[in-house]
Image: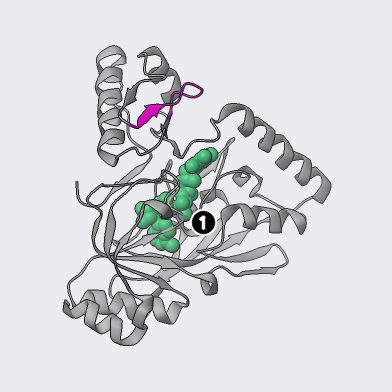
């Protein structure tokens, strides 16, 4: 047993899991094991876990709902931390909202719309957690996290609590520039008072739009590539003939070329091979370097 495992085991007992398969914690349903895995239920627990990993020189990464991840078949070395129910709470004070990083983004959207608060309707149907959405600067239909966030609270790589302003976070298209290995615990939003019924119909409209555009039924991780400036990744992929292209158990969706689906038993290496193939075909045909939106993590 290594020393980090020993230290965490003595505090958390069986809550610390070794060689924990991650596939069932991702929307792709793909991926090997984490060396060590733990769910931190409170900020204090998270601080203790991070401080221990830091002391032992181990890397610790946070897994949200795994809806934007491709975990390698070999899995993740070091410690994977998930946030538990204690970090999924919401506090609404007028138009100011504080949401725990483990809260489902969809549940946050529903809660604020119910209170007649505007600004997060774009999030309807974006799966994942508030923390994952913040890291990815999740967005859709012209909206994005960056517009409504005021403060981001979390724990540093060394296990210290820290709050970051919007400027510290440096939001960009589907990315942020957080300090290395920073784990978000909660996010402050400034929303605007709105008409509840009007917000509900906007959300229903976005739900219908999404349902008509996205493939359903097979495991996937949403858009594989970011849209290049002024264009659409889906169109470039379709022009390059990638719709339906298959590699083992993985294939570009026949419905939306920018989605890769797991047809059953797909391996991360097969998804990655499809990603590489698509990038080289699109580059050869259109001269555009597609950038993956899906994050590839673990040992490749
Ligand atoms: C069907 C489908 C539709 C989608 N549609 C959209 C869309 O319209 N718009 C959009 O932007 N995205 C979309 N996505 C992608 C995905 O849902 C978002 O990127 C989402 O915000 C990821 O959240 P998550 O909790 O699943 O994060 P994960 O996938 O678990 O993690 C993503 C990254 O965030 C990090 N992370 C997660 N939580 C924390 C935390 N608390 N602290 C620090 N780091 C953390 C992880 O380490 C990883 O680097 C879609 C995905 C699917 C499957």
Which residue occupies 56% across, 45% down?
126
Which residue occupies 30% across, 19% down?
282
Horizontal side, residue 291 vs residue 256: left or right: left
In the rendered structure, which segment of residues is drawn in magenta? 249-259
| 160 to 184, vertically: above or below | below
Horizontal side, residue 120 vs residue 187: left or right: right
> Is residue 232 visible in the rendered structure shown here?
no
Q: Quadrant of residue 8?
A: bottom left
> Is residue 212 visible in the rendered structure shown here?
yes
Name the image quarter holding the N terminus: bottom left
x, y (%) of residue 97?
A: 64, 64
Secondary-structure class at tag 1:
loop
Which residue occupies 41% across, 65% down?
82
Which residue occupies 17% across, 72% down?
57
x, y (%) of residue 296?
A: 30, 45
254 is within the stretch colored magenta: yes
Ligand 1 neighbours mark 1 (CB distance < 8 Å): yes
x, y (%) of residue 247?
A: 30, 27
Q: Nearer the viewer, residue 281 or 191?
A: 281
Horizontal side, residue 185 vs residue 11: left or right: right
Horizontal side, residue 204 vs residue 264: left or right: right
Name the chief secondary structure element in magenta: loop
Q: Nearer the viewer, residue 283 or 62?
A: 62
Residue marked by disc 1 = 129
Q: Nearer the viewer, residue 266 or 240?
A: 266
């Amino acid at each position: 047993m290594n020393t980090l495992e020993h230290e965490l085991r003595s505090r958390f007992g069986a809550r610390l899991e070794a060689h924990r398969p991650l596939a069932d914690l991702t929307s792709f349903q793909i991926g090997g094991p984490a060396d060590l895995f733990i769910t931190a239920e409170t900020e204090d627990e998270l601080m203790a876990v991070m401080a221990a990993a830091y002391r032992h020189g181990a890397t610790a990464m946070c897994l949200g709902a795994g809806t934007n991840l491709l975990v390698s078949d070999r899995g993740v070395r070091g410690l994977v931390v998930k946030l538990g129910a204690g970090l999924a709470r919401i506090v609404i004070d007028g138009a100011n909202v504080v949401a725990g990083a483990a809260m489902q983004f969809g549940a946050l959207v529903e809660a604020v719309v119910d209170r007649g608060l505007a600004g997060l309707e774009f999030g309807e149907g974006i799966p994942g957690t508030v923390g994952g959405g913040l890291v990815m600067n999740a967005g859709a239909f012209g909206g994005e996290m960056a517009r409504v966030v005021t403060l981001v609270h979390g724990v540093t790589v060394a296990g210290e609590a820290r709050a970051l302003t919007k400027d510290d976070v440096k939001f960009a298209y589907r990315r942020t520039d957080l300090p290395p290995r920073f784990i978000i615990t909660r996010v402050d939003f400034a929303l605007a008072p709105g008409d509840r019924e009007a917000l509900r119909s906007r959300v229903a409209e976005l739900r219908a739009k999404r349902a008509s555009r996205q493939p359903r039924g097979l495991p996937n991780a949403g858009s594989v590539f970011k849209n290049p400036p002024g264009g659409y990744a889906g169109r470039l992929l379709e022009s390059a003939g990638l719709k339906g292209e298959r590699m083992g158990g993985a294939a570009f969706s026949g419905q939306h070329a920018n989605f890769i689906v797991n047809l059953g038993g797909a391996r991360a290496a097969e998804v990655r091979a499809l990603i590489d193939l698509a990038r080289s075909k699109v580059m050869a045909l259109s001269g555009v370097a597609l950038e993956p939106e899906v994050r590839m993590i673990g040992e490749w």
